[in-house]
Image (spheres, coloured by chain):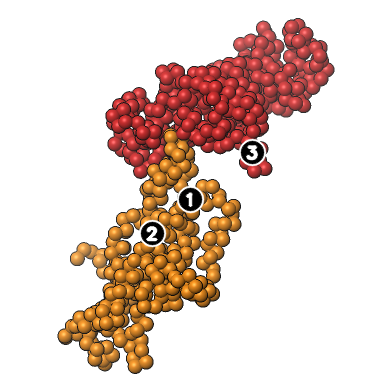
Chain colours: A red, B orange
Amino acid sequence: MAHVTIKGLHKHFGAVHVVKGIDLAIADGEFAVLVGPSGCGKSTLLRTIAGLETASEGTIEIGGRTVNDMRPRDRDVAMVFQDYALYPHMTVAENIGFGLRARNFPKPEIETRVRRAAKMLNIEQFLDRLPRQLSGGQRQRVAIGRAIVRNPQIFLFDEPLSNLDAQLRDEMRSEIKRLHQELGATMIYVTHDQIEAMTLADRIVLMNAGQIEQSGSPLELYERPRTRFVAGFLGSPKINFIRATLAEPGIVFTDGQTLPLPESAINRYKNHLGKAVVFGIRPQHIDRSGIGRTASITSRIDLVQPTGARTYVTFAIGGEPVMAELDAHDAGKPGDELKVAFDLDHFILIEPENGNVL
Amino acid sequence: MTRGSFTRANIARTLLLGGFMLFTFAPLYWMFITSIKPSDDYLAVPPVWFPTEPTILHYTAALFAYRGFDGLINSIIISLAATLLSTGLGTLMAYSLARFNTGGQHLSFWVLSQRFLPPIATVLPIFLIYRALGLHDTHFGLIIAYTVFTLPVTVWMMFAYFRQMPKSLEEAALVDGCTRWQSLWRVAIPLAAPGIVAAAVFAFIACWTEFFFALILTSRTAFTLPTVFRAFLGFQGAQYGEASALSMVSLVPSIILGILVQRHLVRGLTLGAVRG
């Protein structure tokens, strides 16, 4: 168990600047999820922590020791790869015990440890099989077993679930979360899937274009995003962004409809009065039940997508599509006139030029 | 006979395969028959399809009077040594090219480009160098030469093999606790075994059948099997029996090799290593 401290980390691949100055401290026992769109540098950051890439600039400390010049084997980290990377010529037991053999552990100890890890992951019955005789989910378990058997200071996961089908992914996600609770180890997990990030993380580190966009607890990022990018990345269905102007009575949309703002909000944003803003609100905060109590908007339904309990309804405000998550039995049908209320306890205003949340 | 065994497709298939068998085995058959025919029967008209009095005289003459046996031993030593060196070095070179991009794009192509050079262009300089260094007519000299000639191809075969091998396997080994050498030895090499076997077979066959360099670079000591055949073509005619007998002998190691490695030549060990 150990904490990880990264200071001023840069990584260049030739002329390409992939990681652009990362400062990050991950506490002992924390489950940190690096999330972001593909190409944002999250995998490179993880591989640099593992020692599979060298840092161009900056330092990485694991448990207080600077590891920049250490070989991967000396960093005491374990890594689970996206493609599992099981050794195809070894049985499951040999795969799991490989790291211990490479470190010259005594045979009986290897055997007990392999057995214990296999038991934890429910793969005891496969110990004599070769990886190609296993299903995707079982292979993923072996890959995780190979990591936990060594009892390393840090676990690194590089998009471990992205090759699994949806159902298996949910199952393995809970498994990994349970493992973290049982082992209490520091885990750093890379994914591009925001659901994985939200469900697993103690802390989400949201990356974009080689930099950290925002880092904090899942709810913090979800409820108080600092930039348009963060607001747009987390949450499903995606948050709505609607162009508007901030005026004395409230938010004025391009079609002229106005949402009157409460006094407190007007005061908060008074420096921006008269300016163009982007109004951001999540589909969950647009509803019919609030009509009468809070500000409402009228439009016409374009699209209806039922999902079971809730139905996603798309309509337009000033020509821009807006999605609301409505009760399944009260959604209406395309062409209907729609009146919805906006929950003004949950909205954000964004500066259009730089994307910062006001 | 089941119904349908005389369909047109079946007849065509049988004829085609039969023709191909004939094409493949007829020369072998004729070679074998010639090797046990008395000399008078070589060119007899009508041809002698099977000699009434088979003889092993041609074998003993080719092997001992013409020193075919010494040539066989030399060929085995030189081909095996060159094959081992070439596949060993080639595998390491290819690994370096594939994993560390050693020498950029150009080095790997330069390696292959060595094969573009016609052998005739290099044989005289090599001959002179060998004379000066005392390598002429030595096993060692020919082993070096054959290693160098086969390296470009073994390197390229292994280069292709390592490049398609997922990098994450070795990375997993590195994180698991291996040094680079250990990850090569315990993970990459075992997985590359089918490729190594294929490269070795290729190198061995190239060495085993090489004639030109052996002719120029050896004389009485390190001469190889192919060079012995020179002696069978004289001014007064050809010794078909001896030539055929020695050809039969030269086939034996290739056939043994073929049987030994057939199993390993099947690729697919890496299947199932990654993905679901």
* Residue at which label 1 appears: B95
The answer to which quarter of the image holds residue A279 is top right
C-alpha span from label 3 to label 1: 24 Å
**What residue is at 27 percent from the left and 80 percent from the top?**
B62
Whole-percent x, y for residue A138 in the image: 37, 33
Residue B252 in the image: above or below residue B184: below
Q: Secondary structure at mark 2?
A: helix
Task: Tell me the subunit letter for badge 3.
Answer: A
Q: CA distance from mark 1 to mark 2?
A: 16 Å
* Residue where numbered disc 2 is placed: B84
Residue A194: which quarter of the image? top right
Quote the CA–CA distance across marks 3 and 2: 40 Å
Q: Is residue B56 left or right of residue A92?
A: left
Q: Are marks 3 and 2 on the same chain?
A: no
Q: Earlier in the sequence, mark 1 or mark 2?
A: 2
| Amino acid type indicated by mark 3 | His
Q: Which residue is mark 3?
A: A12
Q: Position of residue B8 (x, y in %)?
A: 31, 70
